[in-house]
Image (spheres, rainbow, N blue to C red):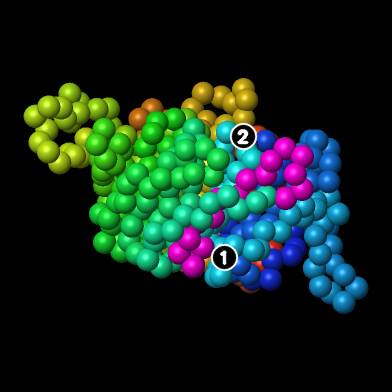
Amino acid sequence: MARLALSAELVGHEGRAWQASWDRSGEQLATCSGDRSARIWTPVAAARFFSSAQEAAVAELGDGERRTSESWQCIEIIDNAHKRTVRSVAFEPTQGRALATASFDGTTAIWEKEPGADAHECVATLEGHENEAKSVAWSPSGQLLATCGRDKSVWIWESNGEGDFDCISVLMEHTQDVKMVLWHPVDELLASFSYDNTIRIWKDDGDDWCTVATLAGHTSTVWAGAFSPDGRYLASVSDDRTLRIWTRRPERAEEAGGADAGFYCQPSMAYDCIATVPDSAHSRAIYSVSWCGPADGAPAGELGYLATGCGDNAVRVFKVTAVGERLEVALVHTQENAHGLSDVNCVQWNPAHPGWLATCGDDGTVRIWHLES
């Protein structure tokens, strides 16, 4: 039976730890917090750490205070840009030298670290959201950046290099807060998740970005989502305590639009919910989900693992298997009290070291786990 083994604990944030983002090498982890900072962490010896799966005792100081495990270190604290909570953080995916942070102060900051430099410098501050910015995400090419906020909007920015960004679209079709934005791993599509209970899929139609699909089915706030690594499936989690998996229907010629499609962008994609983990699996709202692809050499049909972070203080791991046209989603492990008696705000699988998971909690800590079969 699979289980999560705690391998390291990262201590330093003085407020809730909201989100974690691995760089493309999987050997640096950025986190952000209610203490208005972002931190960058790395294993002291990455090759040795990720090649072994030994459990690490959670270290404590003499007075009972927690401290960072000896196998990890904080190499940078970024705390000089935002006036309020830093809610989201994301490494640029191609070179990993840039970092974006989105804050409740309504701004998104872009940080770059030149080769040989000791620290990141703020090279751009993106303004436009009327209030809290909730999420920031880079496109796979690193050329586009998406942000979303409490003002019900999604903004798309284009990088022109050297810290210069232009806003190329402001999308206002959600009717409530937008909680998260997420890029498709293969196609230039953007997904947004909202308090209005829906997920929207956005695409550039040549003139502007527009909704090409609206995914409805959740009965309460949709907090987050995760694409499968090949982009074929989309998982979503909600305040309704369910996890849903969606897949895109094959496109029909009449759905593709064209010269007679009219002036306005027409919905041209359709997604079906093909699997639902019922609300009995989680006892409170699910705040985060992450998808780890199958291991090399895995049998046909195995699609890897989903991890969820929940308001019931637990992290759950589900194995996903394709059986013909349908998916089976089986709960294989529940890590109760993954952050003590605190909500789990984020789960994030390592992109380069399969089976390694970072989690963030209301207790202010970041934990590194290894999935053992």
Q: Secondary structure at mark 1?
A: loop
> How many numbered callouts?
2
Residue shown at 43%/58% (left/top)?
127
Does the magenta run of residues contain 7?
Answer: no
Which residue is rendered at x = 67% and y = 44% of the image?
A: 113
Q: Which residue is mark 2?
A: 95
Residue 200, percent from left and from top: 31, 48
Is 201 above or below relative to 177?
A: above
Residue sitting at x 10%, y 36%: 262
Closer-to-camera residue (165/71): 165
**Residue 255 shows in the view:** yes
Q: Nearer the viewer, residue 171 or 178?
A: 171
Most extreme residue toward the bottom, as rendered?
A: 63
Position in image of residue 185 (x %, y %): 46, 34
The residue labelled by disc 1 is 82
Amino acid of disc 1: His
Chain-order first, disc 1 or disc 2: 1
Q: Position of residue 310 (x, y in %)?
A: 53, 61
Q: Nearer the viewer, residue 86 or 17?
A: 86
Residue flagged by tag 2: what amino acid is it?
A: Gln
- Height in image: 166 above or below 260? below
Verify CB contact (< 8 Å) between mark 1 and mark 2.
no
Picture quadrant of residue 270: top left
Residue lying at 25% horizontally and 54% vertically, measured from the top left: 173
Quadrant of the image for the C terminus? top right
SS type, badge 2: loop
Tell me the magenta residue range: 103-119
Residue count near mark 1 (Cα–Cα under 10 Å), binned few <14, some 14–19, many ≥20: many
Examine the image and state in which quarter residue 157 appears: top left
Residue 175 screen position, x and y as percent: 26, 61
